[in-house]
Amino acid sequence: MAESDTQVHELSRTLGLIRVIEMNPEGRARIAYAAGQHMCHSGGVVQGGFVTGWIDAAMAHAAIAMGGADVVPMSLELKVSFFAPARPGTVIAEAWVERRGKRTCFFEGRLLDEGGTVLAKASSTLMLAERARVESASKAALG
């Protein structure tokens, strides 16, 4: 397994990935995550960074579904609005492309609980970078 594949696996494990439900080439993705008690603060409320991470990951999956495996989606901007607390259990992050440019794309996403209640919404501006270029720059930076 390549180093970047190992990192993606570890990140997915940390986020509680259950399964990728959908990756549509039209720029859509749906992912199921397990929100664990270890992700919570204040009496069982999932910390906002996990909520943000789940939606951000769904937007990245949608970008990869649309642009192919040689694309690395790089966040230029990310805004999240929280509507209700996420609690331990299964949550679904879904995302879609709103507008696609050659290198810059605009995505929307949301997080739902098992009953379909919208817990949070997000919008993101992503730059679609070449995987080889990103990995080469990372290796050079890390020595």
Image (tube, helix red, strand yellow):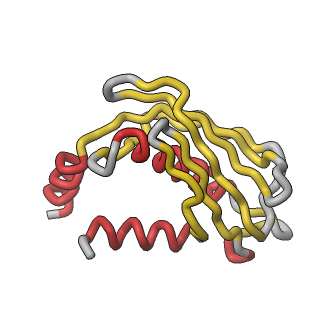
Counting every numbered tag in the picture gives 0
Residue 54 visible somewhere in the drawing: no
For the point 35% across and 40% down, the residue is 67
From this view, report whether residue 71 is shown above or below residue 8: above
For the point 41% across and 39% down, the residue is 66
Image coordinates for residue 6, horizontal then vertical, percent: 34, 73
**Relative to 37, 125 lies left or right:** left
Figure quadrant of the C terminus: bottom left
Q: Foreground residue, 143 or 36?
A: 36
Image coordinates for residue 63, horizontal then vertical, percent: 43, 41
Residue 96 visible somewhere in the drawing: yes
Figure quadrant of the N terminus: bottom left
Image coordinates for residue 120, horizontal then vertical, percent: 73, 45
From this view, report whether residue 24 is shown above or below residue 7: above
Q: Foreground residue, 134 or 1?
A: 1
For the point 60% across and 35% down, the residue is 108
**Relative to 93, 115 lies left or right:** right
| Quarter where residue 7 is shown | bottom left
Q: Foreground residue, 21 or 105?
A: 21
From this view, report whether residue 15 is shown above or below residue 112: below
**Relative to 139, 22 lies left or right:** right
**Relative to 28, 89 lies left or right:** right
